[in-house]
Image: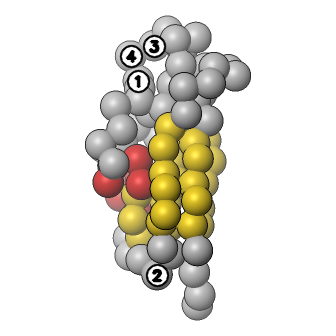
Amino acid sequence: EGKKILCGDFNLDINTQSLSIIEKGMRNLVKENNVTSTRSHHYKKDTKFADYIVVSKDVKVKRFEVLSDVVSDHLPLYLDFS
């Protein structure tokens, strides 16, 4: 019960069955916002996704974005919500 936010490095590609299971009843903000990658230029493999923010439908998303700050092979995700 209540609002839920699940975020992190899932190490899952965007079209996997495992991610579909996590998304049930939730909003995948990476997909919803047509993000093209959550990886920085430090990541050399073809997979462009690993990190996600998934929220329950009752979470009001004010702003979501993948930031361009390079801190590792992952790009930081930003969420402003209520």
**Which numbered mark, 2 or 3, is in the foreground of this view?**
2
Picture coordinates of residue 48 (x, y %)? 41, 26
User: Within 10 Å of the Cα at label 2, are there few (<14), some (14-19), or many (20+) other Cα atoms?
Assistant: few
Q: Nearer the viewer, mark 2 or mark 4?
A: 2
Find out whether the residues at labels 3 and 4 contact each other: C-beta distance under 8 Å. Answer: yes
- Name the residue carrying label 4: 46
- The image quarter containing residue 7 is bottom right
Left or right side of 73 for 34 = left
Q: Residue furthest bottom?
A: 1
* Mark number displayed over residue 45: 3
Nearer to me, 11 or 34: 34
Please, what is the three-letter code of the amino acid marked with disc 4?
Answer: Asp
**Tag 1 and tag 4, C-beta contact below 8 Å:** yes
- Tell me which residue sits at (58%, 47%) in the image: 78
Q: Circle 4 sits in a helix, a strand or a loop, which is it?
A: loop
Whether the residues at callouts 3 and 1 have beta carbons within 8 Å, the answer is: yes
52 and 20: which is toward the camera: 52
Q: Which mark is residue 47?
A: 1
Q: Nearer the viewer, residue 27 or 66?
A: 66
* SS assignment at label 2: loop
Residue 42 visible in the current orientation: yes
The residue drawn where x is 45% and y is 13% is 45
